[in-house]
Amino acid sequence: MHTDSIQWQVEVDKKDIAYIVSIFEGYDDLAVVRTLDASRGLIELMISPDYLEDTRRLVDALSKEIPFRPLARKADGGSSVSSG
């Protein structure tokens, strides 16, 4: 099991932040969503490496209804976050 988290910074419509947080809260241990700047819609997904693929699939599915604009990824090893 990995211990370091992977961080994805993503810009979304600020009206969608609460919805995104509630979706991720429904998936225990998948990722933690942190709001970095609510006025810009800037959030950070803190992902356990063990759940990277599951998180990627969830973000890809959500991006069909919510535009995700990826900004930065740390300790990721590559990502395919859709841009909506």
Image (spheres, rainbow, N blue to C red):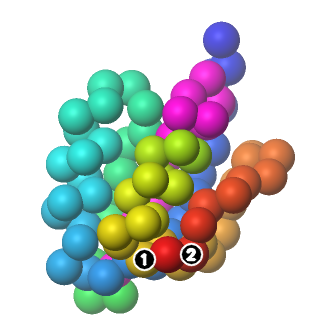
Which label number is shown at residue 67?
A: 1
Question: Relative to the observer, which residue lies in front, 7 or 57?
Answer: 57
60 versus 83 height, above or below: above
Most distant residue in the right direction: 77
* Left or right of residue 15: residue 47: right
Q: Let me know if residue 22 is in the magenta part.
A: no
Residue 36 visible? The answer is no
Kind of element beneath mark 2 = loop
* Left or right of residue 49: residue 66: left
The answer for how far apart the CA atoms under marks 2 and 1 are is: 6 Å
Residue 1 in which image quadrant? top right
Q: How many C-alpha atoms fall within 10 Å of the one at disc 2: few (<14), some, or many (≥20)?
A: some
Q: How many C-alpha atoms fall within 10 Å of the one at disc 1: few (<14), some, or many (≥20)?
A: some
Q: Which residue shows up at 75% across the image and 47% down it?
A: 75
Question: Relative to the observer, which residue lies in front, 79 or 62?
Answer: 62
Q: Which residue shows up at 53% across the image and 43% down it?
A: 57
Q: Could you tell me the amino acid type at mark 2?
A: Ser
Most distant residue in the top direction: 1
Query: Which residue was labeled with disc 2?
Result: 83
Q: Which residue shows up at 61% across the image and 36% down it?
A: 52
Q: Position of residue 48 (x, y in %)?
A: 56, 31
Q: Could you tell me the amino acid type at mark 1?
A: Pro
Q: Position of residue 50 (x, y in %)?
A: 61, 23
Kind of element beneath mark 1 = loop
Question: Relative to the observer, which residue lies in front, 25 or 74?
Answer: 25
Magenta span? 41-55
Most distant residue in the bottom direction: 39
Task: Kindly check if marks 2 and 1 are in contact, taking CB atoms under 8 A apart as contact.
Answer: yes
Q: Let me know if residue 54 is in the magenta part.
A: yes
